[in-house]
């Protein structure tokens, strides 16, 4: 089956620093990747959608300059949280959509970000 | 607008009893419906999906879901609950509208607690 990896699984950083999270589709090409944020005991909140080779589309209320998304290849997307603050602490999940044959979405295991 | 509702924040079931986690949806056109499970601090795991065909869909870990078009429901069921089934369950519908990137629209999630 299709596998999506996410790295790191956990990261602790200090306020003001930047953190990069990688999302890779290991055995398929992902034309679209989605980045979600999840608060404790809540549903997934879509942050942005990225299509390979083009700029990401951000959901309303998500700061594009704070959450930088790069989708440079069909197997890799990165989310960089810039100038992190404690309120950015959250669980971030990526998802990769396989174009063929079925547009199915596959999820990474998530990254727990803690900003101190 | 397309939406998914999970009317129960939490469902409590005794081990060995049947369980049902409810989901209703609102879409234009034919629905593509999904159930995912999330264990604490983990990513989402796919359970099952309905695209077309038999209204009773069988999935992973003994779960099944029944698609009911007239009631616009897609309830998740299991004949005999296990303590290890305790987790957060999400219902989702795929957005098939133009320019949606086939993103998933998520329910709020239902916490399932199975008591020994």
Image (cartoon, coloured by chain):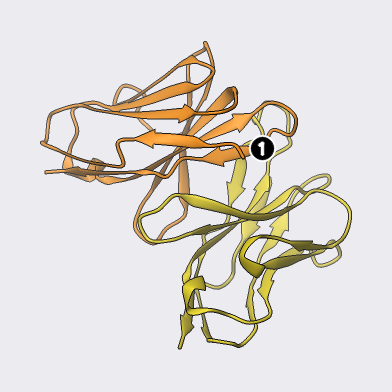
Please tell me the colour of chain A: orange
Looking at the image, residue B94 lies above or below residue A7? below
Looking at the image, residue B32 lies above or below residue B22? above
Mark 1 = which residue? A104
Q: Residue at x 66, y 65 (%)?
A: B23
Q: Residue at x 75, y 47 (%)?
A: B32
Q: In front here: A37 or A113?
A: A113
Q: Residue at x 54, y 16 (%)?
A: A52
Q: What is the x, y in percent for residue B93?
A: 67, 49
Q: What is the x, y in percent for residue B113?
A: 47, 78
Horizontal side, residue A113 vs residue B104: left or right: left
Q: In front here: A53 or A47?
A: A53
**Quadrant position of residue A69:** top left
Q: The N terminus of chain B is located in which quarter?
A: top right
Horizontal side, residue B107 vs residue A68: left or right: right
Please tell me the colour of chain B: yellow
Q: What is the x, y in percent for residue A81?
A: 27, 29
Residue A61 visible: no
Q: The C terminus of chain B is located in which quarter?
A: bottom left
Q: In front here: A34 or B38?
A: B38
Q: Residue at x 74, y 34 (%)?
A: A102
């Amino acid at each position: 089956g299709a596998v999506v990896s996410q790295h790191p699984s956990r990261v602790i950083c200090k306020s003001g620093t930047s953190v990069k999270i990688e999302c890779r589709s290991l055995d398929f090409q992902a034309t679209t990747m989605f980045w979600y944020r999840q608060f404790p005991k809540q549903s997934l909140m879509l942050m942005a959608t990225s299509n390979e080779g083009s700029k990401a589309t951000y959901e309303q209320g998500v700061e594009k300059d704070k959450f930088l998304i790069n989708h440079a290849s069909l197997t890799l997307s990165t989310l960089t949280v810039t100038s992190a603050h404690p309120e950015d602490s959250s669980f971030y999940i990526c998802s990769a959509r396989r174009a063929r044959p079925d547009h199915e979405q596959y999820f990474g295991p998530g990254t727990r970000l803690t900003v101190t | 607008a397309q939406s998914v509702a999970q009317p129960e924040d939490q469902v409590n079931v005794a081990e060995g009893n049947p369980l049902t986690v409810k989901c209703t949806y609102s879409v234009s056109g034919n629905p593509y419906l999904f159930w995912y499970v999330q264990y604490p601090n983990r990513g989402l795991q796919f359970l099952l999906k309905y695209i077309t065909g038999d209204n009773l869909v069988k999935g992973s870990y003994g779960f099944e879901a029944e698609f009911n078009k007239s009631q616009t429901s897609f309830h998740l069921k299991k004949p005999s609950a296990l303590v290890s089934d305790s987790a957060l369950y999400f219902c989702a519908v795929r957005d098939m509208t133009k320019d949606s990137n086939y993103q998933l629209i998520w329910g709020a999630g239902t916490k399932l607690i199975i008591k020994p």
